[in-house]
Image (cartoon, rainbow, N blue to C red):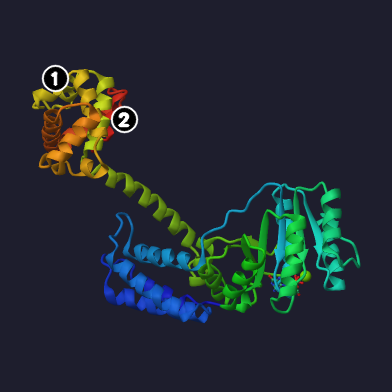
């Protein structure tokens, strides 16, 4: 199953390129469509996603430190995660788990796999046989419990699920109780009644719907039906080993919005279970083994970029307020700014007493977020001026004065920002600890 070869070849052509050009993006999208449609993903969904990928790949700004190839792959990845669902984090504490699903979907096998999984995580699992429809079900689960080497609860021949559950709840001492229920060949009211009985008697923390990967798009409807009957908290997709259609099942589950794909089963053995991981799955679907590493890199770069972008943001009144707060702790402002080599600071500001600074802070607190962003709104508007003055217990002349001073500061900050030499000097001082507690205070100045 190498669905992604075509896609890999197109993406390869991007190595070394420095711009994202339309024709390459188009051919990537075309290959991706082929991959997804042959994985039985709904055609309409694929076409919608294609449009989004094209637009995002061309519009989104290229992150610094990422190659064009990585940029495009990231866009594709984000959309595929949207399509196929996010990575699942299993709950690793004592709990009661109920498995539900139609005949042959892999419930009983999944019950044993989960028991094995939790056992490996250091918890004590137990299996409870509540498939009262098929006589052989009891033996099947009992044998599996021997393989896992875990506790087993059941009453051979019993048809009342409540009796079995009561026995298990009374006598078990294990941490993770995993209940296997009966299926049907199709969803019906009889099954609903039985599932509700189990739900009420067992009171599970988690209800996993077990679906076979080969059912494809029908998975969405099943997720809905089971969710409407007793509610589901997650989905286990089994038989991922035998079919190329896993994408169809996963995307249908994600699109149904009922619950997340939690685990994937890929074989008949008890250790053929994995936690659903979107990086891994998408990488495998597309045939990119290095996908996880790429996503890690992108996460790091975008975090750094986030910090950088914040640093060059516009200096706002909110920042100004933070500066005032910091200044109150630091002492006379002129001294502080003097150290930066900025002697031309407005005298009115540097000589403000503490009282004045406190007033300024109160004034800024009385502004709306929009006013803080655009103080020019206040300057020309008498009712705003008065409202802020009243709110902060000041005069409108004082509000005006604050805005004037803020404007002066903004100008100064802009000059400062442009002066790389000065910035370097400050950074060095901050690093060497000479500025001590001032570091935090001046971060917000956008330096
Ligand atoms: N290849 C493969 N077979 C599986 C997987 N899970 C279950 N099976 C097989 O599918 C059949 C039905 O599984 P079972 O657990 O009894 O389904 P149930 O009726 O829902 O309890 C059995 O033959 C299992 O061995 C899987 O992940 N991969
Ligand atoms: Mg079964």
Image quadrant in which you'd find residue 113: bottom right
Q: Is residue 237 left or right of residue 75?
A: right
Percent x, y of residue 336: 20, 22
Label count reads: 2
Q: Residues within 10 Å of mark 1 (few under 14, many from 20)?
A: few
Residue shown at 82% from the left, 65% from the top: 141
Quadrant holding the N terminus = bottom right
Residue topped by disc 1: 351
- Mark 2 lies on a secondary structure that is helix
- Mark 1 lies on a secondary structure that is loop
Residue topped by disc 2: 440
Mark earlier in primary sequence (2, 1): 1
Q: Is residue 29 left or right of residue 141?
A: left
Asked if residue 154 is positioned above or below residue 383 in the image, the reply reads below
Looking at the rendering, the quadrant in which ligand 2 lies is: bottom right
Q: Is residue 60 left or right of residue 216?
A: left
Residue shown at 21% from the left, 31% from the top: 390
Q: Is residue 378 visible?
A: yes
Q: Residues within 10 Å of mark 2 (few under 14, many from 20)?
A: some
| Real-space Cα separation, disc 2 to disc 1, in angstroms | 22 Å
Q: Is residue 112 visible?
A: no
């Amino acid at each position: 199953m190498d669905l992604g070869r075509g896609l890999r070849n197109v993406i390869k052509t991007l190595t070394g390129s420095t711009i994202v050009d339309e024709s390459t993006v188009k051919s990537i999208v075309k290959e991706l469509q082929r991959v997804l449609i042959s994985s039985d993903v709904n055609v309409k969904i694929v076409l919608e996603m294609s449009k989004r990928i094209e637009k995002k790949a061309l519009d989104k700004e290229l992150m610094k430190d990422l190659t064009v190839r990585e940029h495009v792959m990231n866009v594709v990845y984000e959309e595929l995660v949207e399509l196929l669902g996010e990575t699942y984090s299993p709950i690793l504490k004592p709990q009661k788990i109920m498995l539900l699903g139609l005949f042959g979907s892999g419930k009983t096998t999944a019950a044993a796999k989960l028991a094995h999984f939790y056992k490996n995580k250091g918890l004590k699992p137990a299996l409870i046989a509540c498939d009262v429809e098929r006589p052989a079900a009891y033996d099947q689960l009992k044998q599996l419990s021997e393989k896992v080497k875990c506790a087993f609860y059941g009453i051979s021949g019993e048809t009342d699920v409540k009796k079995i559950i009561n026995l298990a709840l009374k006598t078990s001492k294990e941490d993770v109780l995993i209940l296997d229920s009966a299926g049907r060949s199709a969803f019906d009211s009889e099954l609903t009644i039985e599932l509700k009985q189990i739900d009420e008697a067992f009171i599970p923390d988690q209800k996993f719907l077990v679906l076979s990967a080969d059912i494809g798009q029908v998975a969405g409807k099943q997720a809905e039906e089971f969710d409407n009957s007793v509610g589901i908290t997650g989905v286990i997709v089994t038989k991922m080993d035998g079919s190329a259609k896993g994408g169809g099942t996963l995307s249908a589950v994600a699109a149904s919005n009922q619950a997340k794909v939690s685990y994937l089963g890929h074989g008949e053995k008890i250790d053929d279970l994995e936690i659903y991981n979107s990086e891994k799955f998408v990488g495998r679907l597309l045939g990119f083994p290095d996908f996880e590493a790429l996503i890690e890199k992108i996460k790091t770069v975008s975090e750094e970029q986030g910090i950088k972008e914040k640093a060059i943001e516009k200096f706002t009144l909110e920042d100004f307020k933070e500066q005032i707060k910091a200044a109150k702790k630091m002492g006379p402002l002129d001294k502080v700014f003097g150290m930066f080599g900025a002697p031309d600071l407005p005298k009115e500001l540097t000589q403000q007493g503490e009282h004045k600074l406190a007033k300024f802070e109160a004034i800024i607190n009385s502004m709306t977020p929009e006013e803080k962003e655009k103080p020019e709104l206040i300057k020309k508007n008498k009712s705003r001026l008065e409202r802020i003055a009243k709110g902060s217990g000041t005069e409108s002349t004082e509000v005006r004065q604050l805005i004037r001073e803020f404007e002066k500061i903004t100008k100064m900050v802009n000059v400062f920002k442009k002066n790389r030499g000065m910035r370097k000097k400050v950074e060095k001082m901050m690093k060497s600890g000479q500025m001590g507690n001032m570091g935090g205070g001046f971060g917000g100045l956008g330096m």
